[in-house]
Image (spheres, grey):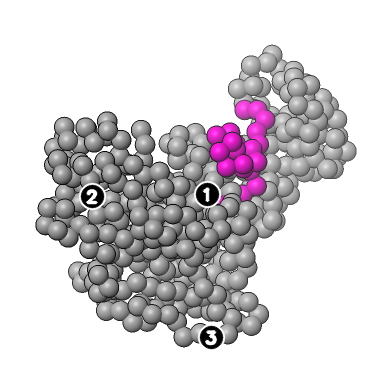
């Protein structure tokens, strides 16, 4: 199945009604933003834009999909004919992938006819909410790891397609590699993995399992040493592979204590360069708690692929302008600011970010050290500007985390790392 039916029923009933009453072709501007960040978060990370643009370019309704919609009574004949010709011909602008965002940041702007823009709402939000949530969690883990290696290994803890997207988002945010081979092939992400407990249990004893693995993969492999007794496992690992073994992995227990004991034991056996990798229900808080321990790398699964307690980035897609006229939603607690927004990030001469300025129906007054945040992605439905690359996005996340005030990197709850000032528009 293609991407066209990855939408909600009411998107097409709105198109159906708008085609009937003549409003479908009115020129509209929709924006994606967050009213607030998920609890405990001080910044968000834009992720998924590269995937999304490819999906928008391929967004088509094939005959079988249209037959389904007609048979289910979702659309009438005129709407079905319109869908059969659908191709997005509008404009998309947005924050570069890997950019940090805050409440009110206009991270994506979609312009065109009402019908062609509204039909993309669910697809846009499902991609950006998922990928940005994973990237924000991953970025917090990268900060907590303090330069140590992070391996994403959460494929078995989420939907099979979400696993690939999550691996991409985690790598974008600074993870070193993924266990997911589909992500490796699709996005060029380095992959990593050696053996699970099942491989040890398959053999008659632990030494036989280690010998088999070393024979196949060499001493540059990682041996999982906690199937039975960890200390004995380490002794057997070094006895089989020698002190040149690359790494051992511990997947359970009190990791802080076990890391200390394992480091001491490895050193006593002459394996002073053998690394210690830990895994097992890690999140950013657990990683931070291990900062002073002799751990060289972390394997993270469930927490990263589920956004570490925030599985969606709380992004919304709202109509802000119709035929050049600002429109606003005034309902209590869900008000919007009308008009197309332009955003810049302000910095001190040292490069520290101080404020994000968002202007409705205009541009911010220039100030020294401003950095524009939006870039064009599509014009009249065609790609423009530089292509989105993971390498660029990774560097953008790294630079963004360096630029925000140090308080913004705390894992505890608090205000957004920098304030957002919205100028103009009608709340």
Q: Position of residue 154 (x, y in %)?
A: 52, 39
The residue nearer to you, when weighing 136 against 236, is: 136
Query: With respect to residue 182, does 421 lie above or below?
Result: below
Q: Which residue is mark 3?
A: 367
Question: Within the magenta stretch, is there residue 164?
Answer: no
Of labels 1 and 3, earlier in sequence is 1
Quarter holding the N terminus?
A: top left
Number of the front mark, 1 or 3: 3
The answer to which image quadrant residue 332 occupies is bottom left
- Circle 3 packing at 10 Å, graded few (<14), some (14-19), many (20+), is few
Q: Position of residue 343 (x, y in %)?
A: 45, 74
Q: Which residue is mark 1?
A: 169
- Circle 1 packing at 10 Å, graded few (<14), some (14-19), many (20+), is many
**Residue 89 shows up from this direction:** yes
The residues bearing labels 3 and 2 have C-alpha atoms spaced at a distance of 41 Å
The structure residue drawn at horizontal position 55% and vertical position 34%, both measured from the top left corner, is: 182
Of labels 3 and 2, earlier in sequence is 2
The residue range painted magenta reads 172-196
Tell me which secondary structure the magenta stretch mostly adopts: loop
Query: With respect to residue 404, does 238 lie above or below?
Result: above
Query: Dot 2 lies on which element?
Result: helix
The residues bearing labels 1 and 3 have C-alpha atoms spaced at a distance of 33 Å
Residue found at the far left of this picture: 21
């Amino acid at each position: 199945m293609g991407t066209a039916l990855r939408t909600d029923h009411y998107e097409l009933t709105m198109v159906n009604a708008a085609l009937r009453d003549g409003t479908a072709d009115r020129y509209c501007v929709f924006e994606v933003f967050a009213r607030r960040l998920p609890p405990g978060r001080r910044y968000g990370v834009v992720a998924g834009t590269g995937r999304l643009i490819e999906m928008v370019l391929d967004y088509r309704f094939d005959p079988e999909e249209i037959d389904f919609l007609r048979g289910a009574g979702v659309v009438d004949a005129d709407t079905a004919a319109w869908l059969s010709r659908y191709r997005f011909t509008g404009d998309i602008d947005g924050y570069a992938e890997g950019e940090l965002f805050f409440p009110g940041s206009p991270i994506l702007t979609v312009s065109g006819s009402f019908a062609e823009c509204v039909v993309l709402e669910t697809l846009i939000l499902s991609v950006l909410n998922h990928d940005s949530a994973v990237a924000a969690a991953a970025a917090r883990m990268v900060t907590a790891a303090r330069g140590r290696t992070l391996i994403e290994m959460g494929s078995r803890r989420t939907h099979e397609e979400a696993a690939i997207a999550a691996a991409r988002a985690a790598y974008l945010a600074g993870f070193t590699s993924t266990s997911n081979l589909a992500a490796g092939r699709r996005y060029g992400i380095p992959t990593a993995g050696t053996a699970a407990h099942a491989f040890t249990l398959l053999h008659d004893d632990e030494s036989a399992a280690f010998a088999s693995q070393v024979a196949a993969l060499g001493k540059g492999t990682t041996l999982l040493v906690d199937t039975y007794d960890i200390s004995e496992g380490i002794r057997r690992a070094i006895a089989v592979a020698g002190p040149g073994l690359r790494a051992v992995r511990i997947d359970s227990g009190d990791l802080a204590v076990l890391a200390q004991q394992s480091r001491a034991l490895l050193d006593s056996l002459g394996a002073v360069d053998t690394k210690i990798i830990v895994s097992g229900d890690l999140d950013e808080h657990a990683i931070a708690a291990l900062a002073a321990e002799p751990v060289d790398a972390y394997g993270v699964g469930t927490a990263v692929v589920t956004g570490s307690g925030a599985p969606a980035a709380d992004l919304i897609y709202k109509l802000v302008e119709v035929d050049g006229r600002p429109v606003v939603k005034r309902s209590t607690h869900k008000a919007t600011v009308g008009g197309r927004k332009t955003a810049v990030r302000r910095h001190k001469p040292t490069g520290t970010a101080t404020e994000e300025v968002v202007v409705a129906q205009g541009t911010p007054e220039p100030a020294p050290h401003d950095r524009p945040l939006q870039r064009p992605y599509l014009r009249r439905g065609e790609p423009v500007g530089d292509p989105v690359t993971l390498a660029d996005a990774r560097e953008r996340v790294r630079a963004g985390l360096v630029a925000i005030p140090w308080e913004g990197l705390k894992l505890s709850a608090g205000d957004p790392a920098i304030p957002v000032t919205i100028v103009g528009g009608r709340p």
